[in-house]
Image: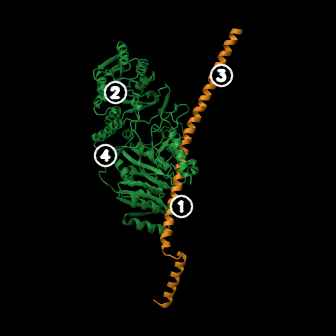
Amino acid sequence: MPPDDVTELRAEIERLRRLVGPSERSYADLEQDLLAARDAARGAEATAGSLRGQLAQMHVELARARQDQDHLQRAIAGGARMLTGRIGRSVRARLF
Amino acid sequence: MTADATAGRSPLVSVLTAVHDPEPEHLTACLASVRAQTLADHEHIVVDDGSRRPEVSEILDVVATRPGVTVIRRSDSGGIVAASRDALEAAQGTFVALVDHDDVIEPDALETMVAALGEDADVAYSDHDLLRPDGRRATPLFKPDFSPERLRAQNYITHFLVARRDAVERAGGFADGYDGAQDHDLLLRLSERTDRFVHVPRILYHWRQAPTSVSSSSTKPWAFEAGRRAVADHLARLGVDAEVRETAHEGCYRVVRALAAEPLVSVIIPTRGSAGREWGATRVYVVEAVRSLIERSRYRNFEFVVVVDADTPPAVRHALHDLTGDSLRLVEFAGPFNFSEKMNAGAVAASGELLLMLNDDTELIEPTSVDVLVAHLQTSDVAMASGKLLYADGTLQHGGHVYNHSVNHALLGWPGDSPGPRPLLPLAVERECSGVTAAAALVRASVYREVGGFPPDLPLNYNDVDFCLKVRAAGHRIIWTPWASWYHFESRTRHSVLLDEEYQFVNQRWHYELNNDPYYNQNLLPDRADWLERPFRSGAPALEPTSGLLKRAADGVRRARP
C-alpha cells in the first residue's frame, strides 16, 4: 500500500475516533441509547394508544347513556303532556 | 306439509322446563308466561328434578291440574340433563321449546318462533336479555344470524331456542356429561346435522339473574369446563383434529386446529418501496413486512410475490432479494396506482395453493398467525380468513368488517387487547364475518380465481368489500380470528379520502348486503360497528359493576404520569 494511502487511512481513523469520543465503547453505548430511545418511543405510543382505546370505549358508553337519557326525557315529557291533558279534560268536563 | 298444517292448525309446541328448587315467585312467573302464550297449540312439560322446597311442590301440584300442563316428578335429583331428557321423552309436539324454570318469555314468543321456523327451518333462536333481581330488564343480547364458527367459540345463542322435535331427537337429545352446558352441547349437535337455523331479532326471552340461576354466577367453572368438553367432542365428531382451550373470558373457547399439511402460501404484497417513521425510527415498509414474516412466523412454506411499481428503489429490491432468496418473485407493475390490478397481477404470478394478501405497511405480531389462518382454510367451505390488525399505538384497526348501512371496521380504535363490548365479546372469539380487510387475509387461490379477483373499477377503496361479498355469494364462509395478529401502520385518517364514486359502485352492486349484515343485528344503531344499541334498547346496566372501564382508564392515566 503506498505511504500516502496509509497516511490517509490513519487520518480517517483519527477523524472517526474524534467523532466517537475518547472511548470506542461509545459505539456500544450509542447503540444502547438508540435501542432505549426506540423502546421508549414505542412504549409512549402504546401508553397513548391504551388511553385512546379506553376513550373509544367510553365514547360508546357515553353515546348509550345520552341516547337513553334523551329517549327517557321524551317519554317522560310525553307522559306528562298526556297526564295534564287528561286532568284538564276531566276538570273541564266537571266544570262545564 | 305437516299434518297440523294440513288440518289448518298451527303445529303443537312442547315447552320443556326442568325444575330444581327455584325461588317460588320465579317459578310462578315462568309458568304464567308460558300459560299466557298467544299460540294456543302448546303443551308445557314440567319435570321436577327432586326439588326439596315445599312451596315448589305446592305450585306444581296446582299447575298439574291445568289442561296442557304435564308435571313429571323425579324422586331424586338427576341434574338438568336427566330432567330435560325426561321432558323430551314426554313431549308430543312438532317443536320443542326450552325454557328455564325461573325465566320468562314474551306472550307472543312461541307464535313468533313457529312463524319464523315455517316449513323450512329446523332451529329458531331469538335475542334475549337479563331479568335483574329488582325485576328490571338489562343487558340485551342482540345476536348475529347463525354463525357456526362462533358457536364453537361461545354459546352466543343460549336462549331462546325452539327446534323441531325430530331434529333434536336425531341429534341425540340431551347427552350425559354436559350439565351446565347442555344447551351448548345440543346446539353443536344440531349444527352437525342442519344449517337451517333461523334467528328472530327480537327479545322474546328474559333470562333471570338470580342466585340460583347459573347465568348469574361468576363462579361456575364446572359449566365452562362442560362447555369446553362439548366443543371438543363436537370437533371430534366432525373429524377435526383440534384442541379446545378455555380463554381469559368466561364462556369463550379457543379452538387450536392441527395442521394436516403445510401447503405453499404465496404472500402477495403490492408496494412502491416507500419508507416512513414508526416508533421513532425510519423503516422501509415492505422490507420490514417481509422480514417480520421470515424472522417471526412459525409457518415457513412461503413464496413472496412482491408487485413493485417501476419507481421502487433498487436498494429495496436488493434488500428483498437478500431476505427471501429463491422464494421471491418480483412482478413489475406499470401505470397509475390501482390496488385491485396489482393484487390481480400478483395472483396470476403466484403458484401457491393459498394466497396471503398483505399490505406492505404491516408487521407480523403473533408467530402462529399464518398457522391459524391456514388451519381455518382446511375446512372446505371456509375460503378466507383474517386476523386482528393493530395500529402502531396498539389500538384496533381491524376486527372484521361490519356492513351496517355503511362499511366499517368493527370497533375501530378500541384497545387492542379488549374482548369487545359485553355481553357478546366479539373481539374475543373466532367468528364468521361478512367481510375482512385485504391488508392481511388468507384466501384459497382457487376461490380467488372463481370470483374473478379484485375489481379494477375500485382502485383505492372497497375492493376488499366487493371481493369478500363475491366470496360469500359463491357460498363460502369468511372467518375473523383474534388469534392471528399484525401491526398495520395505516393512516388513521385514511377514511377521509374515500371517494364517493367508489362507495356508489359497491353500494349499487351490493346494496342489500351492505344494509343487512347477517353477523350484526338490526337492533343496533346504523352506521356504527361498536354494538351500540338503538335508543332505549340498551336495557339497564348489568348487575356486574361496569366501573372496570373507569378503573382501567384511571390506571392508564396513572401509568402515563412520569
Q: Tell me if mark 3 has few (under 14), some (14-19) or many (20+) residues whose alpha carbon lies within 10 angstroms of its own.
A: few
Question: Would residue B170 appear left or right of B333 to someone viewing this image?
Answer: left
Q: Give the mark nearer the N terminus: 2 vs 1.
A: 2
The N terminus of chain A lies in quadrant: bottom left
Residue A15 in view (yes/no): yes
Q: Which quarter of the figure has residue B182?
A: top left
For mark 1, what is the residue?
A: B280
Q: Chain of mark 3?
A: A
Q: Amino acid at mark 4?
A: Ala
Question: Could you tell me which secondary element the residue under label 1 belongs to?
Answer: loop
Q: Chain of mark 4?
A: B
Tag of residue A81: 3
For mark 4, what is the residue?
A: B242
Whether tag 3 and tag 4 are in contact, CB under 8 A, the answer is: no
Q: Amino acid at mark 3?
A: Arg
Chain drawn green, letter?
B
Label 2, label 1: how far apart the Cα atoms are = 61 Å
Colour seen for chain A: orange
Can you name the residue that lies furthest to the bottom here?
A: A3
- From the top left corner, tell me how far across and down residue B488 is, in percent: 48, 54
Q: Nearer the viewer, mark 2 or mark 1?
A: 1
Q: Are marks 2 and 1 on the same chain?
A: yes
Question: Could you tell me which secondary element the residue under label 4 belongs to?
Answer: strand
Question: Could you tell me which secondary element the residue under label 2 belongs to?
Answer: strand
Q: Which quarter of the figure has residue B62?
A: top left
Could you say which is closer to the camera, residue B343 or residue B183? B183
Q: Tell me if mark 4 has few (under 14), some (14-19) or many (20+) residues whose alpha carbon lies within 10 angstroms of its own.
A: some
- From the top left corner, tell me how far across and down residue B515 is, in percent: 51, 38
Tag of residue B164: 2
